[in-house]
Amino acid sequence: MRSVLLKYRLEILGVAIGAVAGWCYWYFVGCASGTCPITSKPVNSSLYGALMGYLLFSMFKTNKKV
């Protein structure tokens, strides 16, 4: 289990930071009318942020040849 966490630590960190950033965006900016598909609910905004965080942080992963 520990080796899996170490192997994917950048992706896990990206998901966590992205989810928090998505929630913060919903809380501080949000959507006044409630019709925005991503920012109308905190769950949607957090999931979208988690996905974007994963994609962003996974770009910095290097493939080490053993």
Image (cartoon, rainbow, N blue to C red):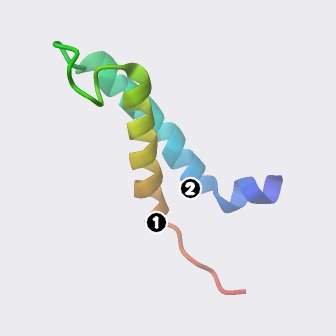
Q: Indicate whether 63 appears above or below 25.
A: below
What SS does tag 2 mark?
helix
Q: Residue at x 83, y 52 (%)?
A: 1
Instruction: Please identify the residue farthest to the right as the structure is shown.
Output: 1
Q: Indicate whether 11 appears above or below 28.
A: below
Number of numbered discs visible in the structure rendering: 2
Q: Residue at x 36, y 24 (%)?
A: 24
* Mark carried by residue 40: none
Q: Indicate whether 46 appears above or below 64.
A: above
Of callouts 1 and 2, which one flags the residue occurring earlier in the amino acid sequence?
A: 2
Question: As rendered, which of 23 and 6 lies closer to the eye?
Answer: 23
- Quarter holding residue 37: top left
Q: Residue at x 47, y 39 (%)?
A: 17
Q: Amino acid at mark 2?
A: Leu
**Which residue corresponds to mark 2?**
10
Q: Is residue 39 left or right of residue 44?
A: left
Instruction: Please identify the residue farthest to the bottom as the structure is shown.
Output: 66
Q: x, y percentage for residue 57?
A: 46, 56
Quick check: marks 1 and 2 in contact, CB under 8 Å? yes
Q: x, y percentage for residue 20?
A: 45, 30
**Which residue corresponds to mark 1?**
60
> Which quadrant is the C terminus positioned in?
bottom right
- Quarter holding residue 42: top left
Q: Residue at x 81, y 53 (%)?
A: 2
Neighbor class of circle 1 (other Cα within 10 Å; few <14, some 14-19, many 20+) is few
**Mark 1 to mark 2 CA distance (whole Å):** 8 Å
Question: As rendered, which of 48 and 17 lies closer to the eye?
Answer: 48
Neighbor class of circle 2 (other Cα within 10 Å; few <14, some 14-19, many 20+) is some
Q: x, y percentage for residue 63?
A: 58, 78
Q: Indicate whether 43 appears above or below 17.
A: above
Q: Amino acid at mark 1?
A: Phe
What SS does tag 1 mark?
loop
